[in-house]
Each structure stands twice: as C-alpha cells, then as structure tokens.
Amino acid sequence: MSTRREFISNTGKAMVAGGLVTLTENETPHMIENKFIHHVYFWLKNTGSKEDRAKLVEGLQKLSKVTTIKTFHIGMPADTNRDVIDRSYAISWFVLFDNAADQASYQVDPIHLKFVEECSHLWSKVVVYDSVDVK
Amino acid sequence: MSTRREFISNTGKAMVAGGLVTLTENETPHMIENKFIHHVYFWLKNTGSKEDRAKLVEGLQKLSKVTTIKTFHIGMPADTNRDVIDRSYAISWFVLFDNAADQASYQVDPIHLKFVEECSHLWSKVVVYDSVDVK
C-alpha cells in the first residue's frame, strides 16, 4: 500500500520506465504520449467457428512474444450495441509500441511472419488502424 | 532509479492501483486485463479542414475529464500504408475504462453529452469498436 502511494506521489506523472500507468479514481487520467498504437480487427472465414477463433487467439498469444511489444490486448466485442458500434469482428488485437520503428520491425519479426503463415487462412477480413499522437 | 527498480521488482506484475504499466525492453510485455477498451474513429464532414479538426481535438481534450476515463489517447493516422490499413479517418479516440459500467456511465456523463452537442456537427462518420478480454 505505502509503496504504491509513494510511487505515485514521488513520480508525480504517470510514467514508469518508458511505459504508462493508469491511475486510481480521482486522479488525473493518463494520456498516452509518444507511443504508436496498432489496433487490428479480424473477421473469421468460418464465421462462428469456435475452433478457428481459438486458433487465432492462440496465434496472437504467441505473437505477443515479439520483443518490441510493450502492452497488448486480445479482445472480443463488448456487449455494447449502438448504430455506430461495429461489433461484427471476431477478435481484436491491440498493441502499444514505443515508436513507429518498433512497429516496422514487428512487421518483419520472424514471430510475426510465422503468425501470418499459420493463421492468415483463418480470417476473411482484417482491418488495421495505426495511430500516433495528434499534432 | 532505485525507486523504479524496487517498484517493478516488488510488484512482480505490471499492475499499479488498478491500472497498467508497460515495461522496459527485455521485460515480459504487459497484457491489458479486465478492462474495457473503447476505440473511436472520426471522419470529418469538411474533409481536410484544419479548423474543424482542431475543434474536434479540443472537444476530446475536454471530454478526457470524464472521471471514469483512466487512460486515453487522441490520435491521427500513422505514416504506415498497406492495403489492410484504414488511414482515411481524421482523428482517433482511445479510452481505457475499468469496466463496462464505467463506459456506460461515460455515455451519459454531462461532459460527454456536451461534447456530442458541441462537436457532432463536425463529423460525417464515426465508427466505434468496444472490446473486452477474449473468453
């Protein structure tokens, strides 16, 4: 408990060793800065296939071992359902890189190439959004 | 320096006060867990209008004050350009909530309602992807 408090008060900002920290309630929210956000949405070829979905998730778990990946999330659509929400995808893949060069290196990393080789037959569609800080 | 090291080694895992920490190189990457990811992409009505883009960014900065927002990012398309990448949006808005209830409360928060009132005329299209941990 005291360690956490000291840590947060000592640093003042929510930055740790090149990374990010989200804060407890009533703290100022943390703005992600100077990172490269890579967010991918997959649609399965065999829509609704639990087996293919599990294979893709397993593939992403292996893919998370790429060393330039600092933070990641393997997701599925939440229960929210409004007109503007696209909940038709099967699996989402969120990655936070330190910079664009790390993302570029990830694209040609042997682990990534193996993922594409082993898993690309599973999806019919993939959409990628790469974002950097607005200027 | 020692504080950082102690902190990381004391906790063992990359969790701080309900939040997340990304790690330095050679550390195990951090998997976001038990969070609600809300990622929104905006297309401007006046495509290429710097003024409208600035208004939207300003609106999102105000929106970030909603208290259930723990971590956020205001983004624009990175320089990456491949067939699967959608880089046609103008502005992206990434929010990490602690849970689905916090996201639901954000939707009806007065700050959010004011954002919609003040800014919705700026965009022609908005796409939202809400994601939770894959099960």
Image (tube, coloured by chain):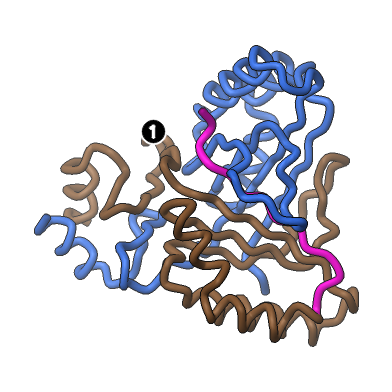
Chain colours: A brown, B blue
Nearer to the camera, B60 or B52: B52
Q: Amino acid at mark 1?
A: Thr
Number of labels in the image equals 1
What residue span does the magenta drawing correspond to? Answer: A122-135
Nearer to the camera, A35 or B35: A35
* Residue pictured at 83% horizontal, 40% vertical: A84
- Looking at the rendered image, the quarter that the N terminus of chain B falls into is bottom left
Q: Residues within 10 Å of mark 1 (few under 14, many from 20)?
A: some
Q: State whether residue B78 is above or below residue A117.
A: above
Q: State the image coordinates of residue A52 (x, y, percent, origin top left).
A: 79, 83
Q: State the image coordinates of residue A68 (x, y, percent, origin top left).
A: 43, 66
Q: State whether residue B20 is above or below residue B106.
A: below
Q: Which residue is mark 1?
A: A28
Is residue A98 shown left or right of residue B49? left
Q: Chain of mark 1?
A: A
* Residue pictured at 86% horizontal, 81% vertical: A49
Is residue A70 shown left or right of residue B99? left
Q: State the image coordinates of residue A110 (x, y, percent, origin top left).
A: 53, 80
Q: State whether residue A118 is above or below residue B58.
A: below
Q: Secondary structure at mark 1?
A: loop
Inspect the magenta stretch and tell me whether residue B133 lies in it: no
* Residue pictured at 62% horizontal, 50% vertical: B80
Q: State the image coordinates of residue A102 (x, y, percent, origin top left).
A: 45, 60
Is residue B5 shown left or right of residue B16? left
Q: Look at the magenta stretch and give its main secondary structure.
A: strand
Picture quadrant of residue A47: bottom right
- Looking at the rendered image, the quarter that the C terminus of chain B falls into is bottom right
Picture quadrant of residue A79: bottom right
Q: State whether residue A129 is above or below residue B54.
A: below
* Residue pictured at 42% horizontal, 40% vertical: A33
Is residue A63 shown left or right of residue A9? right
